[in-house]
Image (cartoon, rainbow, N blue to C red):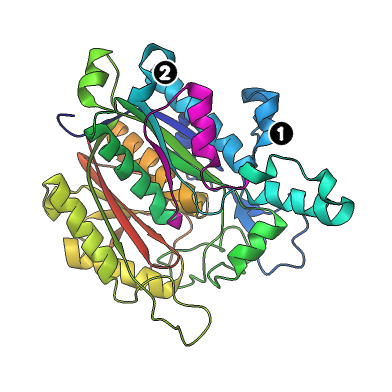
Amino acid sequence: MNGAPVFTGVGVVAPTGVGTGAHWSAVLAGEGALAPVDRFDVSGYPVGVAGLVRGFDAGACLPGRLVVQTDHWTHMGLAAADLALDDAGADPAELSEFDLGVTTASSSGGTEFGQHEMERLWAQGPGHVTVYQSIAWFYAATTGQISIRHGMRGRCGVLAAEQAGGLDALAAARGDLRDGARLIVTGGTDASLCPYGLVAQITSGLLSPCADADRAYLPFDVRAGGYCPGEGGAMFVLEDPESARARGARAYGRLTGHGATFDPQPDPWPGPPAPSYAPSGEGLWRAVEIALDDAGLAPADIDVVFADASGVPAADRAECRVIRTVFGPRGVPVTAPKTMTGRLYAGGAPLDVASALLAIRDQVIPPTINVTEPADAGIDLVGAVPREARIRHALVLARGHGGFNSAAVLSA
């Protein structure tokens, strides 16, 4: 591969909409999609607001056999992959199957499918547990199903690093292209808004207990008190630039830089639960430096930062410290459109990448909604109104629970 790989297709399945058009229109309009959870009774849970994907019918876009064999998370991943391939105008059947690959991110696997099978096990016995339980829960299920569905027999894999994994998957896909692949489907989705999945998330101690959807998730705000979970994400077609040119494909942008680091927790940790992010922000700062160096860019070249935006005050302070250190006080516009969707775990960073590519295309920075009392005057946080700007390079930040840090540079 000569040159940075190009994004030729984008597929979105998110609380803000299914398809890039619906998502982008909602984001630019500042339409928040956080709402009380009504999929099951959450009255006994300390969390009740989330970003749910509305109007998604797996049966309308996938074969019936896949719907019953796979989890809701995989349904959304398969649908997003189909949307991305259609958007790219790419027909996998026209390429060598060994030149095609799949690399996705997942942080929870098929929790809803697994929960239902465990319910059958305890209520009805082992004879009522389907054979698909052995695969539907697995982190790599979405990768495998996309590979099978589209005949992609090159290198395939999955990254499990929570929010950061969504960027790490793109970097892994870039490595596959450098090794000779022509086209990789990559990105991530997540879906864990079921009783079992929500209980697992609550143990982190990071979720917001606020029942008001407009106040529950306020990153960088003095009222911040945690984040809201969400589901969905985005998938991409990432291609070798020469291959994309040869078939006349349009490119949204290039993946020019990536950096990843890890902040290990003390072992043993003396108290519950271990903090998710290093208070100093050193790991995230180093990931940014690596990404910029990889892209061959200086901080002044970056036109917008899509923040990780934890909503946890200590983590927000650390991220602001990193942004100020790298770019200087108010040195770059910062946005957090995930205030409209909640944090989608492995799907969150890919959704930010989709928004960043659309921002580059349209030369507009999407808004950060509901944050009206910023806690840090040292960053230039884009507010509730989109901001027109010249955007050549965007930096996307992502941190994953447990110490994962990732940063990616996208370029026009």
In this rendering, the answer to whether 340 lies above or below 273 is above
Amino acid found under the numbered disc labelled 1: Val
Q: Which quarter of the rendered picture does the N terminus lie within?
A: top left
Residue corresponding to mark 1: 68
Q: Is residue 135 magenta?
A: no
Q: Amino acid at mark 2?
A: Pro
Q: Is residue 179 above or below residue 399?
A: above
Q: Give the residue furthest to the bottom.
A: 270
Q: Residue at x 38, y 30 (%)?
A: 101
Residue 153 in picture, x, y percent from top left: 42, 27
* Residue 400 figure quarter: bottom left
Residue at 70 percent of width and 25 percent of height: 64
What range is drawn magenta here?
A: 137-162
Mark 1 vs mark 2, CA separation in Å? 25 Å
Residue with the mark numbered 2: 92
Foreground pick, 272 / 193: 272
The earlier-in-sequence mark between 1 and 2 is: 1
Q: Secondary structure at mark 1?
A: helix
Q: Nearer the viewer, residue 320 or 238?
A: 238
